[in-house]
Every structure is written in structure tokens, then in C-alpha cells.
Amino acid sequence: MKQVVQNYKSGELAVLDVPVPGCKPGGVLVRTVYSLISTGTEMMKVSEAGMSMLGKARSRPDQVAKVMQSVATNGVPATYRKVMGKLDSYTPLGYSLCGVVEQVGAGVDDVKVGDLVACAGNEHALHAELNWVPKNLYVPVPDGLAPQHAAFGTVGSIAMQGVRQGEPQLGEVALVIGLGLIGQLVVQLLAASGVRVVGADPDPARCELAERLGAAACRDPGSTAVENAVAELTDGHGVDQVYLAAGGGSNQPVELAAKLARDRGRVVDIGKCRLDLPWNAYYEKELDVRFSRSYGPGRYDPSYELEGRDYPIGYVRWTERRNLACFLDLAARGKVDVEPLISHVADFDDAVETYRRLKDGELKAVTALFRYAEQAGETREATAPAVAVPTVQVKAGPARAAKASVKLAFVGAGNYATSMLLPHLAQREGVELSTVVTTTSLSGANAQRKFGFKEATTDLDAVLGDKSIDAVFVVTRHSSHAELTRQALLAGKTVFVEKPLALTEDELSGVLAAVEESGNDRLQVGFNRRFAPLLQEARNHFGARSGPAHLRYLVNAGRLAHGSWYLQQGSEGSRFVGEGGHFIDTASWLLDADPVSVYATATSGNEDLQVVLRYPDGSTATISYVTSGPSGFPKETLDLVADGRALRLDDFVRASVYGRKKWVSSRLPKARDKGQNAELAAFVKAVRTGGPMPVPLESLVATTAATLAVQAGLAGGVPVTLARP
């Protein structure tokens, strides 16, 4: 494998071929996707390596002191050989990356091969194609966070630990001196904490960037503008905290901190700047000077970092690893935006040239990233991740006899079941609502009273064992869909499950294993939009097509109410996984095919998604799923263009087709009919007659796999192939 190294004696930088590290117990082997170049810490090290021996000594007096101690203990010749040997060796660079787990060591059970992780440590998160990372120095990357953004995890943890040392409170005012990478992150973390921020940096571009990212005002520290901004925001009292995120040999940051801090304010040193404290200034205000040690508690403790011994959360709330996970969570939710900090992305093979350009000032960057081979544009298609679209072999069972009426059971009686499904079924001839199963007695009793169920119970097994029940509706929370569907299929029931069918590939495989084991493929997922009368009418007017088509589907999903269980992504899956199948199924039905690949991208926080589906004949469907649109705008608008014709659907109220002839649906206001009634009619007919299910099982599986591929695509930042056997 390749790794970036530096010879501290000569200053030489190189990309060397070195052995692949072994995967030791207590850690994972990670293949790097992006690694971050710290333009502060790393470039300081690179610059020092290019100095003369005297220059090196002047820049590192701490190391000179160690050398002098060694001379006193071991003598000049032995010390000289030791120092020269160490200087004339290759040393690694890098300490913050994101990559994919390639191998899992013994004792690790929180990640698996293929998982995306963010890694930290100047011995374990190096600029190298492969790194072995111990357990407490990696965390899984949250769904939807791009790998190039997750590569900021370590520097984000450094900034976070500094902010924690300052103990900011809502409504306070802070001064951040130095608006490089760490300073920019500190600004955002403080703003997210409800603190008003003033920044100081001699670079106007960095000041402007910090203001865009949440600072109230940023100016050159030598100007009066910083002092005026502090006076205005604090009524002349001074800032509550000062964060020193500057480097260099000037004592100006320390003096400015004393001048602009309030009485008994806090000064936190995060960077590596000169600290000649002006005694009178600090004494008179009784300033509290604090140091922030790297990523947080656990740093430099071998038992924590190398042996994986965690500190109990009741005693140490924020460790290195917890800081790392917290920062990634903030980035995933859009509370911290690192995209504007990325000034340059270089291919890993160009590492030496990139360092040269940074050192010479030719390349000015807040942050630069190395992109490894798997992320290079020319190899994306070849190395694209895949989500399996499994097939299932079902032995043909005996034909199901036609029935005059069908007995249905409902598992779950929440809002969707009681508002969108049961009102249609309760009025349908030939349908007997037999049993409703709920986890609470009262909800079952309410459903029984409103819709005429013969029985209400909390005993699912009794329903599955009742041979008189023909079909089971699964209308529960998303996390239980796959398991309940699996159980009902094994019990021989025809199943109607609300979307999604599954939250993971393993859950989908489990459902299909039940189909194969039981020989029962009588399954319908609640993808109702293909049954909407207005959309079916528009499709008929559009007619068959001969060439590729482009479909655009805008879903103005809107914000969820606070406390909605849809927000419980850890247990219930992402919002798009929950309902995105609706829109993928509609697109696939209109294009009369299943997708072969998925590309997904998202805004910060993964709230607004853009999903591009590619189909076998070259057709594409673009689904824009947004939560930031106005509430008065239609929820769903769709356009389909092919062969010189266009179909337009406006929120299931109006539709039109443009071609040789123009067709427009009635302009009279109509209730939005998204197809639930027609879908249920088709399902009941299939159950009653024993005929084929309304949607082929292969289509349901393909739509589910494509929905899951959206999450994989967001995590990897590349197209995802839908792999079929």
C-alpha cells in the first residue's frame, strides 16, 4: 500500500510503498476514502522539517531540553547517534480520515466489514491507503453524512473539546482569535450553542467565511473594529470567553484576550501560540486560563487509546470517542457545515505536490483533502458500491379457491390505518373485518368500535394461528414491518404491509427467506400512487413510448412536528427510507421498468435529498425530496417527458398531457385521490379470487432495494449499483 511520509532531517516528502498493517485484536483495518490535511499542525511540521538544524532547535525548545538531558545521562556520542537516527527516519503525516472497514479484529462488535467510519489519531489515522485503528479512535459515520465531511471528525473533536473547556452558556459572547480550520469550527460550535461570536484574523477572506458561518462580526485583530464589536455586543463589559486558535510567535493573541475579556472571564488555549501572559492584565481581571488537550479525555492514555478501556460515562461524559461521535452527529444534522471549509481536494497520488504548493503559498486553503483512488472520478463506476436485489424461487403451491367474502385482520390501528385504509375497507362488500391487534387495549377497542371489527386483541400469535383469517394488514411502526411480514407469510397469510417493507438489506433477505421457505409469495406493499385514478388516466393518454424518458418528481415533504416518531432514525430508519418507496415505485411504474443504479446527494443535515435513478433503457428519474419548501406549495408534482410528449401531474388534483393532441383533466376542484381505495380494491380482489397480486413481488423487492440504496449512496457519495444475480 502507499503512505505519505517525511524525513525530518532532510525535509523530504514521499509517497512510499509500505506493508499493509495487520488487523490486531481490539481494532479494525480501514481503507481510506478521504483524509484531511491540517493546514495548521501538519504544515507547521512540514515547514520545520525544511529548516536547518539550528532552526529546528529554535522551533522546538522542548525537544532541545530532552536532548540536553540525554547528553547528561548518556554522553554526547550516544545522544548524537540517537538523535540523528531519529531525525533520519521516515515519519508519518495525518491524523483525521474517513474510510471503509476492510477487516474487523477480535473483540470488536460495533462495526462490520463495509461500514463507513471516521478515524482519529496521529498514529492511526494517517495519510495511507490502509490504517489499523483501535476501538476508541473510530466511530461509525451517521447515515447521510458524506465521507469527505466525516473526514473532519478529528479536527472537529479538537474544536469541540476547546469549546467544552470554555463552558459557554446561552446568550454569552465569545471572541475567537485565529480563524483557520479550528477557529472556523469553534465559531460554528459556539453559534450552535447559542453564543454570539466575534472573530479576529488578519485574513479578510477568513473573516468573511466566519461571518457566513455564524459569527456576528470578524475583523483584523489590529483594528479597532474587533474592540468596537465586543463593546457593542457586551455593553462594554467584555466577552465571557476567549478562544485562542491562532499559531505563530506573536504574543498579540494573549494580549488581545486580556484586553477584551470581561472580569473573571475564561481564556482557552486551543492552538499553539506564544503564551507570555501579561501578569497585570490577567491578575487585575482574575482571568481563568485553561488549556484544551487535543480531542478530549483519553488522549495520550494508552489504556484508553490502545487497549480500548473506556471511561464510565457517569465520571467522564465527553471522551475522545464521544466527542468524535458528537461532532459527526452535528455535521449530519446540519448544525455544523464543513463544506465551505474545503478549499481543495487532491488525489492521493499528488500528495507531495500538494504539500509543496501549500508550503510555498501557491495553494491557499483553510482545509485540503486527499481523495483516494476509489473516489477518483475515472474509477467511480468500476468501484461503485452495490445493493443486492435478491430473487426468490417459489415452488408453485395449490391454487387458492375463490371466496364470496374475505376475512381480514389488522396489526396496528394508528393514524394511517384508521384514516386511509379502514374507512375504505369498512364500506366494501365481501370484506369482513375480523380482528384488530394492537399493543394497547384501548386503541384496539377504539378501532373495534369505529370500524366494526369482530374482535380486538393484543395476541398476535392467536391471529396468525387462526386459519379462518385470509389476509393480514401490517400497519405498525417501520421497525417492525419486516419481522411481522415474515411471521404472517410463514403462517400462510396473504399480507398487505404499509411501506417500507424493510429498513435494511438483512431485513429484506429475511422476508424473502420466509417466502421461499413457505412457498407463500402473496405479498403487497402499500405503494398506492400507481393506483391513483388521475395518474392512471394521464398514463393512458400519454400512451406507449419507444425511446428513453426523463421523469422529474418534486416532493415537498415539509417539516415534521416535534416529537414525531418519524424522527427516531436510530430505530425507525430515515424519513426517506420510510416513505421514499412511494415515489420510486411510481417512477418505475410510469417507466415500466426497475432501476439499475441509484445516485443520491443531500444538503447539510440530510434534510433535502436529490435521488437519480437510472433504468435499463437509458431512462432517468430524478426525485427531489425536500423538507424546506413552503407549506402552501403543492406536495407532489411530477413531469414525464419522452418521444416529444410530456405528462404533468399536479398533486393528484389535475393532470395534463402534451403531444400531438393536448389533454387536460377536469379543472373542477377534486379531492386528492392518491389511490388507496383502488389499491385496496385490487388487493381484496386478489385475496377473494386467488388471482395474482396487484404488483409483482419482483417489483416490490426492486423498489425496496432502490430505497435502501439511497442511504448507501448518501454515505458513500457515489452511484450505487442495484446488483441482480
Image (cartoon, rainbow, N blue to C red):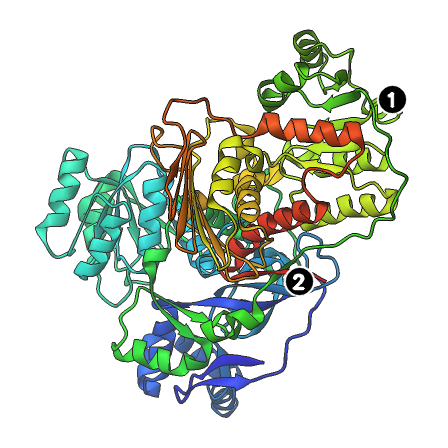
Residue ranking furthest to the left: 224
Q: Is residue 692 above or below residue 471?
A: below
- Residue sitting nearer the eye, 424 or 315: 424
Of the 4 image quadrants, the one containing the C terminus is: bottom right
Q: Label 2: which residue?
A: 27
The residue under the point 34% across, 32% down is 633
The residue under the point 47% across, 73% down is 376
Q: Label 1: which residue?
A: 468
Left or right of residue 60: residue 538? right
- Residue sitting nearer the eye, 280 or 102: 102
The residue under the point 75% across, 36% down is 485
- Residue sitting nearer the eye, 174 or 555: 555
Graded by Cα atoms within 10 Å as few (under 14), some (14 to 19) or many (20 or more), the crowding at tag 1 reads: few
Graded by Cα atoms within 10 Å as few (under 14), some (14 to 19) or many (20 or more), the crowding at tag 2 reads: many
Percent x, y of residue 462: 86, 22
Residue ranking furthest to the front: 661
Amino acid type at image mark 2: Gly
Left or right of residue 279: residue 574? right
- Label 1, secondary structure: give it: loop
> Where is residue 273, by image quadrant?
bottom left
Of the 4 image quadrants, the one containing the N terminus is: bottom right
- Residue sitting nearer the eye, 206 or 333: 333
Could you give the CA–CA distance between mark 2 and mark 1, rounded to whole angstroms? 54 Å
The residue under the point 71% across, 14% down is 444
In primary-sequence order, the first of circles 2 and 1 is 2
Left or right of residue 440: residue 17? left
Percent x, y of residue 329: 49, 46
> Where is residue 301, by image quadrant?
bottom right
On residue 251, the disc is: none
- Label 2, secondary structure: give it: strand
